[in-house]
Amino acid sequence: MTELPEGISFHPDYFDRSAQDALVEAIRAVVREAPLFVPKMPRTGKPMQVRMSNCGKLGWVTDKENGYRYQPTHPKTGRPWPPIPAPLQKLWKDVAAFDGSPEACLINYYVDTAKMGLHQDRDEEEFSAPVVSVSLGDDCLFRIGGTKRGGKTQSIRLRSGDVIVLGGASRLRYHGVDRIYPATSTLLSDGGRINLTLRRVSAKG
Ligand code: SIN
Ligand code: FE2
């Protein structure tokens, strides 16, 4: 594998199989309380290919009318997001190198055919905190670009249990998911992939 850019740290197999099973159980409990929804692009209202939910004080949502934003409640139920499960809090402490807790954990669910276009994570106030991302279920091809659109990119295959951290000089790198590799994991009974993305949203006061 070619070397990853400065500010990206990759922790292959951070969660072993039993930790992955526990995490899936915890996420299933979250989505029972905060059901997956179909996010819609700002202005056009075009649906994204992933289904989403969140846990934490704040959740990332998007719709035609109000665009990308963080909010403390689920867009459909109006209820607060469930708390971030303990193993994810622990992961953040372990790898984030940031003096403050994560406020948002985005849950993305990909079916076999879903992908996510190249984008930057830039709806947060606090860019000194990294983005900590967990893969569960089927493998995916993750693409990492530069901090400007249209630059050179490199790709890395992410597997169930892997953690990748985008911080420092790489905090605002473009990234996306080109494809899912169906049936490459037995973790999720219905297949597909779950991505969990932990973020700090507000600047530390
Ligand atoms: C995202 O950037 O929101 C998701 C990345 C991933 O699914 O690995
Ligand atoms: Fe992202």
Image (tube, rainbow, N blue to C red):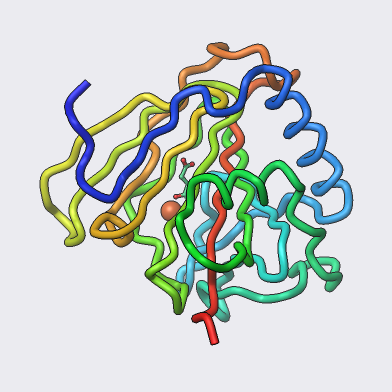
Image side of residue 57 versus residue 155, left or right: right
Locate the C terminus and report the quarter of the image it occupies: bottom right
Image side of residue 157 versus residue 184, left or right: left
Image side of residue 97 versus residue 80, left or right: left
Question: In the image, is residue 110 above or below residue 97?
Answer: above
Please state which of residues 40 and 93 is positioned toward the viewer in this rendering: 93
Q: What residue do we see at 38% from left, 70% from top?
A: 127
> Looking at the picture, how far across and down is residue 183, in whole percent?
57, 12
Quadrant position of residue 120: bottom left
> Looking at the picture, how far across and down is residue 60, in whole percent?
59, 65
Residue extending furthest toward the bottom:
205
Please state which of residues 139 and 161 is positioned toward the viewer in this rendering: 161
Question: In the image, is residue 10 above or below residue 2?
Answer: below
> Looking at the picture, how far across and down is residue 34, in whole percent?
81, 56
Question: In the image, is residue 90 above or below residue 75?
Answer: above
Q: What residue do we see at 40% from left, 62% from top?
A: 121
Q: What residue do we see at 27% from left, 55% from top?
A: 170
> Looking at the picture, how far across and down is residue 154, in whole percent?
20, 35
Please state which of residues 68 and 80 is positioned toward the viewer in this rendering: 80
Quadrant position of residue 131: bottom left
Q: How many marks?
A: 0
Image side of residue 108 versus residue 203, left or right: right
Locate the N terminus and report the quarter of the image it occupies: top left
Please state which of residues 129 and 59 is positioned toward the viewer in this rendering: 129
